[in-house]
Image: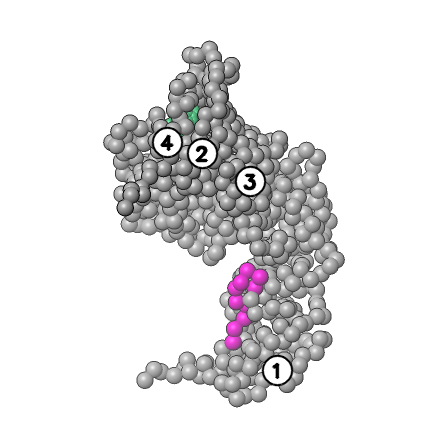
């Protein structure tokens, strides 16, 4: 038999490697920005067209490259950052594998201009699919400008796999944030299709967070700082009251690199213990410095997971440092400090009397003002199932009120619960009502979320809001302001009146739903945007439904809130008229029944 093994040509090998390094425009952006930082730049510009499909350009003012390096940098395993295996344990640069440019050049048309500060002329080099088309001297500023055009032009499968521009752009934006949030000593700008999205000056970390997420973050964060042999920690954690439903604003960095480390993120979250409701998460921007020899350096270029030798010590230190930050700056006496950590905590001042927290509420607000008159088969089925189930167990007849929903008694559209039906609240959280066959328990917040959601999605007319005494200005980043434009119709439908100020990222709000206070608006929109960004990744999601579901969740009554009997009755009535009364729009269970059988059983001692 003849030999069958070939060594693949470089162009093919590079294309295969490119599949790992560059899977979408955002990963090319990451590699180019990292190279610009490794070159010691103090100012970096990112320019993209069509979400990076047509053009990704990164211009830096770093060290530049010599003529021959400009050619060599596109070879595989060509790097100036390490020379020998031992160097792997002392990496201080973002890149070190020498793979990125070779991979990018294999799947795009690349145009590089570069000049070192001691050269009068620079070099321009054009490469397409690994082969050099042109190289000649050129005049250009000190530093490097690299343009990556028509990404995946020779890999149609990959090109077809790309998502909508808005999704690809949001991935690029996330890469940009992950880099700029930790390199606040470098100026960055970001243009997309000719529009300036970010213009970030070199400034303090706090200023950088505010430049990226909006000025309001100044008042939302506590600084966190700790020095130890194992790790040094610097950054900001959010105040408990600004916790969000998503983890989209959790940024953890190690030695200047964004990482995902669920255990360390949990260390920070754990420090909040009972301060934030379940399912909510604090925001944080925390930068760790660790001796590179104490971590696994062999990080895959596109992966963000990292391993540390001293993981459990880091966990304890990070949690304690977060508690310290929260304790020191909020003077929240109820935070339980963990005595097992050996960090020192600043004690509360002597004779310190905690201030009673003030609660904002609208005394005229009644969440139950609207009654509805439609009910569907779905709804009927739910209530039937709920009560039928108990029926089978107990053989009892149902109470006259609920009985009207049994299969033999199809509900009337005007059905209302009997006035004599008693309700009571458990822990100001659940509504309980006795039926002849058991105990019906309803989660009041979930129920209200469902009712609001169906009102928003079913009503064709906008729901009336209340004019604000003074219009409120809400400020956003450029990208977030664009999202506000996208979801504006849903907001108007929900009772807001708002418009974007000409050529700015400020929205003026002149009317809002009844139960939202002026000072809650910015936070309300920020949360909505962050949830919207999360849902954008899911291409099957219906935008309006997602936005309405977020709005309903934000506007629903508190999980814990005392209710009057009439309010409970109204809530249960409204819930019974919903199309899908069993689950909340966010997929949680709304009601359950404890049958008399089950209750009886609970009283029995086990044999
Ligand atoms: P790595 O960053 O892992 O070394 P790359 O393929 O990204 O590999 O880059 C190869 C080499 O090209 C780098 O080691 C560096 O010497 C040089 N290089 C790349 N981009 C720049 C830049 N913007 N400025 C100066 N040198 C650069
Ligand atoms: Mg690199």
Contact, CB < 8 Å: mark 2 with mark 1?
Answer: no
How far apart, in angstroms, are the residues tagged by discs 4 and 1? 73 Å
Residue 590 on the magenta segment: yes
Residue 448 lies in magenta, yes or no? no
Name the mark nearer the viewer: 2 or 1: 2
Mark 4: which secondary structure?
loop
Q: Does the residue labelled 1 lie within 8 Å of ligand 2?
A: no
- The main secondary structure of the magenta stretch is loop
Split into quadrants, the picture shows ligand 1 in the one at top left
Q: Distance between the residues labelled 4 and 3?
A: 28 Å
Image depth: mark 4 or mark 3 in front: 4
Instruction: Read off the residue under disc 4.
Output: 76
> Which label was assigned to residue 106?
2
| Gap between marks 1 and 3 measured at Cα | 52 Å
Identify the residue shown where x is 75% and y is 57%: 461
Q: Name the residue under label 3.
A: 169
Mark before the other along the chain sequence, 4 or 1: 4
Q: Nearer the viewer, mark 1 or mark 3?
A: 3
The percent position of residue 510, horizontal first and vertical second, equals: 71, 45
Q: The C terminus appears in which quarter of the rendering?
A: bottom left
Residue 583: image x %, image y %? 56, 66
């Amino acid at each position: 038999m003849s030999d069958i093994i070939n060594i693949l040509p470089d162009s093919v090998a590079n294309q295969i490697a490119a599949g790992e390094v560059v899977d979408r425009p955002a990963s090319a952006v990451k590699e180019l920005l990292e190279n610009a930082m490794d070159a010691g730049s103090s100012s970096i510009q990112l320019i993209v067209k069509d979400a990076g499909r047509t053009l990704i350009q990164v211009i830096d003012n770093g060290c530049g490259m010599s003529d021959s390096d400009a050619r060599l940098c596109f070879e595989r395993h060509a790097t100036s950052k390490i020379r020998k295996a031992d160097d792997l344990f002392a990496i201080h640069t973002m890149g070190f594998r020498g793979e990125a440019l070779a991979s990018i050049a294999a799947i795009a048309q690349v145009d590089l201009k570069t000049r070192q500060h001691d050269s009068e002329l620079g070099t321009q080099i054009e490469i397409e699919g690994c082969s050099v088309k042109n190289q000649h001297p050129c005049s250009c500023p000190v530093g490097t400008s690299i343009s990556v055009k028509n990404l995946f032009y020779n890999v149609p499968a990959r090109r077809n796999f790309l998502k909508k521009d808005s999704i690809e752009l949001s991935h690029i934006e996330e890469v940009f944030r992950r880099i700029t949030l930790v390199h606040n000593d470098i100026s960055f700008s970001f243009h997309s299709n000719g529009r300036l999205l970010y213009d970030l000056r070199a400034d303090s970390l706090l200023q950088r967070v505010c430049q990226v997420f909006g000025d309001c973050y100044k008042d939302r964060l506590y600084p966190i700082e700790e020095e130890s042999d194992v790790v040094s920690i610097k950054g900001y954690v959010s105040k408990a009251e600004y916790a969000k439903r998503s983890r989209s604003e959790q940024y953890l960095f190690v030695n200047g690199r964004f990482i995902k480390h669920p255990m360390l993120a949990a260390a920070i979250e754990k420090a909040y213990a009972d301060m934030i409701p379940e399912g909510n998460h604090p925001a944080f921007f925390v930068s760790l410095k660790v001796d590179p020899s104490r971590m696994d350096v062999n990080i895959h270029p596109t992966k963000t997971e990292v391993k540390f030798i001293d993981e459990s010590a880091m966990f304890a230190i990070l949690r304690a440092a977060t508690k310290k930050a929260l304790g020191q700056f909020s003077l929240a006496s109820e935070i339980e400090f963990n005595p097992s950590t050996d960090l020192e905590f600043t004690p509360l001042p002597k004779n310190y009397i905690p201030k009673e927290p003030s609660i904002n509420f609208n005394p005229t607000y009644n969440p139950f003002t609207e009654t509805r008159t439609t009910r569907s088969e779905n709804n009927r089925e739910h209530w039937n199932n709920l009560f039928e189930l108990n029926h089978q167990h107990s053989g009892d007849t149902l109470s006259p009120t609920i009985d009207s929903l049994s299969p033999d008694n199809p509900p009337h559209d005007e059905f209302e619960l009997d006035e004599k039906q008693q309700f009571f609240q458990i822990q100001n959280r659940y509504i309980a009502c006795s039926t002849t066959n058991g105990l019906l328990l309803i989660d009041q917040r979930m129920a209200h979320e469902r009712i609001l959601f169906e009102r928003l999605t079913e009503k064709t007319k906008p729901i009336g809001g209340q004019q604000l005494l003074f219009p409120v200005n809400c400020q956003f980043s450029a990208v977030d302001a664009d999202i506000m434009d996208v979801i504006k119709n849903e907001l108007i439908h929900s009772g807001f009146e708002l418009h974007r100020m000409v050529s700015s990222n400020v929205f003026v709000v002149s009317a809002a739903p009844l139960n939202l206070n002026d000072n809650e608006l910015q936070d309300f929109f920020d949360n909505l945007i962050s949830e919207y960004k999360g849902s954008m990744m899911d291409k099957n999601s219906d935008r309006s439904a997602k936005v309405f579901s977020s709005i309903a969740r934000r506007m629903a009554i508190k999980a814990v809130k005392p209710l009057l009997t009439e309010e409970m009755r109204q809530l249960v009535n409204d819930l019974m008229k919903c199309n899908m009364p069993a689950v909340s729009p966010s997929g949680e269970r709304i009601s359950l029944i404890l049958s008399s059988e089950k209750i009886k059983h609970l009283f029995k001692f086990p044999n």
